[in-house]
Image (spheres, grey):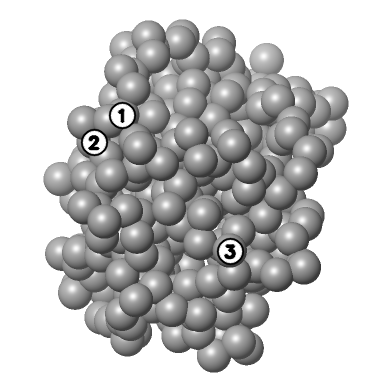
């Protein structure tokens, strides 16, 4: 067989694989190692279409997309962490939220952690954020558009007086209320986590328009940012949905039961971390597909 025949055969095989859907992005076609890599050291998304794989706290992200670091109504904070990747649904969501916030005159929203380029467990900061469908949005709205080099050392600012268990009026204004209301205005939102003190205030301020409050759930911490979680997208059959939310606005006895534990800093009140679940097999393969892994020192 001549060299050109071999080449033609290889090209034909590649076309057949592509047409048959065999170019499954999770196959270790680029594998150059059989050793798993720490997920936070992987600096590039995997090739191929995007899929959220596994659970929010035990999964990974194939074909992650980087959110542009600036856009209408938003800026990405702490870009040096390299956690601004997500499923396209999350990018669309954030760009839409930025535009709604801009139209409402709220000031620039500050986007914190999303997911690592291929998702997976982080070395610091989060148990979830692993499949490209979670994002932290800061509650402070007082930052101007900053040069990227100045965005890594910023401090989150709590809106809660931890001793008094109440909101600090100079930090919690109608703008934060409106931002959270706007954050629920997308059918892809599964849940938004806020500190119980914040949820209590939303319940108090909401008046008769209350359906959106159902999406806002109390959780430890979350006094300087809120955490948006999108539902599993239709293109991600391996994504594991959470149980549906209970009916009602959540402004009930269950919310009140949170308050004694809501004192920030809530670190001590956090429950012990659950045992680390094994990542789905598809994630193991994704991790091995690391031929495009550049030298981390270059970042
Ligand atoms: Zn979060």
The response on whether ligand 1 sits within 8 Å of label 1 is no
Tell me the element at label 1.
loop
* Residue named by callout 2: 267
Above or below residue 149? Residue 44 is: above
Tell me the element at label 2.
loop
* Residue named by callout 3: 204
Q: Position of residue 257 (x, y in %)?
A: 48, 34
Disc with the residue nearer the chain's start (2 vs 3): 3
Left or right: 49 as drawn, with respect to 167 = right
The response on whether ligand 1 sits within 8 Å of label 3 is no
Q: State the separation of the CA atoms marked 1 and 2.
A: 5 Å
* Residue named by callout 1: 270
| 108 or 13: nearer the viewer | 108
Mark drawn on residue 88 = none
| Residue 5 seen in the figure | no
Mark 2, Cα crowd under 10 Å, few <14 / some 14-19 / many 20+, is: few
Q: Position of residue 264 (x, y in %)?
A: 26, 47
Q: Residue at x 59, y 69 (%)?
A: 205
Tell me the element at label 3.
helix
Q: Position of residue 214 (x, y in %)?
A: 70, 48
Q: How many dots with numbers?
A: 3
Q: Quadrant of the N terminus?
A: top right
Mark 3, Cα crowd under 10 Å, few <14 / some 14-19 / many 20+, is: few
Q: Residue at x 65, y 67 (%)?
A: 206
Would you say the residues marked 1 and 2 are in contact, meaning their CB atoms lie under 8 Å apart? Answer: yes
């Amino acid at each position: 067989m001549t060299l050109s025949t071999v080449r033609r055969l290889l090209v034909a095989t590649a076309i057949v694989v592509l047409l048959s859907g065999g170019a499954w992005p999770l196959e270790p076609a680029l594998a150059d190692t059989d050793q798993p890599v720490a997920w936070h050291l992987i600096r590039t998304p995997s090739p191929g279409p995007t899929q959220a794989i596994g659970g929010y706290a035990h999964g990974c992200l194939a074909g992650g997309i980087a959110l542009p670091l600036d856009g209408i109504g938003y800026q990405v904070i702490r870009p040096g962490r390299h956690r601004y990747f997500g499923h396209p649904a999350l990018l669309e969501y954030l760009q839409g939220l930025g535009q709604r916030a801009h139209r409402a005159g709220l000031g620039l929203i500050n986007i914190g952690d999303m997911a690592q380029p291929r998702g997976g467990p982080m070395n610091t900061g989060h148990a979830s954020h692993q499949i490209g469908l979670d994002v932290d949005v800061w509650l402070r709205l007082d930052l101007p558009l900053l040069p990227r080099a100045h965005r890594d050392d910023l401090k989150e600012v709590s809106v809660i007086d931890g001793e008094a268990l109440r909101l600090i009026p100079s930090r919690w204004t109608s703008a934060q209320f409106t931002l959270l209301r706007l954050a629920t205005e997308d059918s892809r939102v599964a849940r938004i986590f806020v500190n119980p003190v914040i949820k209590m205030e939303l319940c108090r301020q909401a008046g008769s328009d209350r359906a959106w409050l159902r999406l806002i759930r109390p959780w430890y911490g979350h006094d300087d940012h809120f955490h948006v979680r999108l539902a599993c997208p239709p293109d991600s059959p391996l994504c594991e949905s959470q149980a549906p939310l209970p009916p009602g606005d959540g402004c009930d006895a269950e919310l009140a039961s949170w308050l004694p534990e809501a004192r920030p800093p809530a670190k001590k009140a956090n429950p012990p971390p659950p045992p680390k679940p094994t990542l789905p097999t598809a994630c193991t393969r994704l991790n091995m597909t690391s031929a495009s892994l550049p030298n981390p020192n270059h970042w």
